[in-house]
Amino acid sequence: MQQEKFTSTYRQVNLNLDHRFSDTVRVYGLAGINQSRLDVDRLQVAIDANDTRDFSIDFRDNPDIPKIGYGIDTTNPALFQYGPPLANGDQRGQLSNFIRRNTITSKTFELNGEWEAAPDFTLQIGGQYRTNKYTARERQLATNTPLALPSGVTLASLTTVTTGIGSNLDGLLQDFVSIDPEKFRDAVGLDNYVYCSLECAKGTYGGVDEKYASGYAMVKFNTANSLPFALRGDAGVRYVHTKLDTYGPITSAAPAGSLYPSRFVISEVGRSYDDWLPSANLALDITPELIARASVARVMSRPAYGQLIPAGSANLVIQTATFSNPFLEPIRANTFDAALEWYFAKGSLISVAYFYKNIESYIQTTSQAVAFQDIGLPLTLLNGTQLRPTDVFTVQRSNNTEGGPLRGFEVNVQLPFTFLPGVLRNFGALGNFTRVRSNINYVISPTLSRTAPLVGLSPETASGTLYYEDDKFSIRSTVNYRAAFLTAVPSGSVDADSTANASSIFVDASASYNLNEHIKLIAEVSNITDETNRLTVDTVRQDPLYTSYFGRTYALAVNFQF
């Protein structure tokens, strides 16, 4: 059973300034503050049935949906246990609970100036100063070892039996006993359990203070009234200085007399870096219906805050260690885009675009086998265990690595059937096809790398929409195709090179009817074909990892306008 309660709160205040000193001089800017806060309370409770020797799982008939034999009556609470582990190590349930609050507070100050130095030629300069403060706080139960149930309390009084699950997936699933979260909280007195963080090395305590100042200069122009051809666009450069102050928890042995064997020691890291980001965008009117576009730019994407918090911990049971990296550099790339657009009729468009990105640096989570004595955590953490300082741990850390090139093209078609007679002129179609190829150098180990497509990027995507629309009634159906794409390289498993998301085709439809100028009826159906989302392991074997069944979604709505 997992019960998760979360609350997301967002607040924002902005002050905008815009003043024209003359027809050619303008100054505008803003000052603003916003805060986003996420509160999460997650409770997980599991009950165990040990020695179910007739358990079976069979993928022979369907590689996505196995036949599962549990070997017991999964609806009978008397066959399950919850309590402390037995002396022989047998588990009798699991318990975990954390309370988390993540907060991001941003303050922005921006001032821009424009001067129209000549007709259709404008100079623009400006600057921005922004601060982002990210804090992550999480407390966990001081012990995850299940305690014995209070006298007189049985699992039968804490559980409920699910209903309807057994009818899913053609009856291959079964209903089962599940902990009732509210009954569990009351029976065991969960509100009286001890929670901790720094003092017991659980949860997290960290943050990032990010400050960046930027300034830019650019020109905007249009030659339609001064030259025989109409060329318009802009060009400029932006300078960005980023300063980071990060702090986070490092697991350390607790001093003598502490209640817990380990604790967090806060590590602090400060650093800064600079970026020059030039860009240019051009559009040429070859004819009134044919437009050529081109753009070049240098771009950067900063690491996620969670990757920057300096933190390190080890799992002594499975001999792994995880470290973040406050010294991560942004992902940086040089980009080029070119497109040709033909507006051959009213509301109609055919466009072809080519794009190229040279990804200079990338961020990967790399793994390395390291003796515990060399990973940077205190040896006293091994006290009371059978582990030795020379025992090898699998250490995972975020690192900057080489990127690689990405190139592709895109075709778009927009075609209202206004050339057809009668009611057929109200039909129309939209279409899109994108093909992308990328080569990223993934670091598998200190001595091994692999070139593979960019994670999360499908080599082909396509969509098509057929619609009908008049003054009263509108209906459309859309088909979206996405080719298979990688989700992780390496996979994290010793016997697989990667994980991937299988290809998918989703079909949606929507319709609306205007009762009058104020009231509209709307109906929508998502995933008409009951498509699934399949995750696989290993490029060659494509073993099933996870399959999500979304089902069809129906929605009815009424839109009122006053």
Image (tube, rainbow, N blue to C red):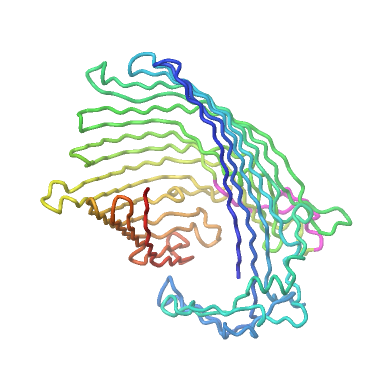
Percent of width and height locating residue 175: 52, 80
Quarter of the picture holding the N terminus: bottom right
Q: Quadrant of residue 514?
A: bottom left
Percent of width and height locating residue 70: 55, 81
Report how many numbered discs are placed on residues in the image. 0
| Residue found farthest to the front | 562
Does 301 appear in magenta?
Answer: no
Residue nearer the viewer, 387 or 32: 32
| Residue found farthest to the top | 118
Q: In the picture provided, is 266 more to the left or to the right than 104? A: right
Q: In the picture provided, is 167 more to the left or to the right than 353? A: right
In the image, is residue 225 above or below residue 245? above
Percent of width and height locating residue 251: 74, 51
Name the residue at 73% across, 81% down: 153
In the image, is residue 176 above or below residue 518? below
Q: In the picture provided, is 361 more to the left or to the right than 208? A: left
Residue nearer the viewer, 132 or 323: 132
Segment tinted magenta in the rendering: 364-384
Name the residue at 40% across, 60% down: 502
In the image, is residue 336 above or below residue 97? above
| Residue found farthest to the right | 257
Q: Quadrant of residue 505?
A: bottom left
Residue nearer the viewer, 243 or 373: 243
Does 368 appear in magenta?
Answer: yes
Q: Quadrant of residue 503?
A: bottom left
Percent of width and height locating residue 170: 41, 78
